[in-house]
Amino acid sequence: MKRAKVGLLLLLGGLLSGCGNLFEGGVTFGGPTVLVSRENFSFSRETDQNNNTVYTYSYTLTLYALPGSGAGSVVLLDSSDNAVDAPFIIPEACPPSSPNPCGPYSRDYQKRASTPLSPVQVVKYRIISANGQSKVVPLPAPIEIY
C-alpha cells in the first residue's frame, strides 16, 4: 500500500512538473512560456552614391523563457495568426527554481528598403512543445517589427 502511494505521488509529481504552462482555456504540457521584446532599435535614412534614398531598420528580437516553462519552439504571430518570422527554438526547460527567466534567445535584424517600411504588430505567439502540443498566447502589449 505504501509503495502504491509513493508511486502515485511520483506519477502526479512528474505530470505536474511536465505541465509547466497553465493558461486560460487549458494546459499545454512542457511548452515554453516567454517574455518577448524588441531591443536596440535604430532607424536611418541615407542617400547612396546614385542619389537614391535608403531606409535602414535595425533591431534585436529577444525571448526569455519563464521559470517552470519547457523546451519547444515559439512562433511570433500578427493579429491574423500569420507567422512574422521563423520559429525561435527554446532548447531546454527553464527550471522552476530559477530566480530569473532563462535565455536570452535573440536574433539580430537589419532591413534596408528604398521606401519606408510599415511596421508589423506582433500581438501573440504560438508555442509548440517538444511533444507537439500547441497553444496561442497573447502578448501583454504589441511589439512592432519591420
Image: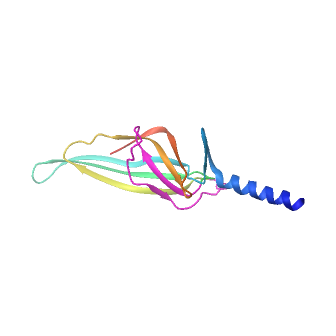
Q: Residue at 38% across / 51% down in the picture?
A: 85
Q: How is the image coloured?
A: rainbow
Q: Residue at 50% across / 39% down in the picture?
A: 138
Q: Residue at 70% across / 52% down in the picture?
A: 16
Q: Quadrant of residue 23?
A: top right
The front one of 140 and 88 is 88
Residue 59 spot, x, y in % from top left: 36, 50
Q: Residue at 85% across / 57% down in the picture?
A: 5
Residue 75 is inside the magenta segment: yes
Q: Quadrant of the C terminus?
A: top left
116 vs 75, left or right, is left
Please state the extent of the stretch shown in magenta in the rendering.
Answer: 70-99
Q: Quadrant of the N terminus?
A: bottom right
- In the figure, 130 relative to 76: above or below? below
Which residue appears farthest toward the left when viewing the image?
50
Residue 78 spot, x, y in % from top left: 40, 41
Residue 134 spot, x, y in % from top left: 53, 49
2 vs 131, left or right, is right
6 vs 69, left or right, is right
Residue 111 spot, x, y in % from top left: 28, 51
Instruction: Examine the residues drawn in magenta and state their main secondary structure.
Output: loop
The front one of 67 and 126 is 126
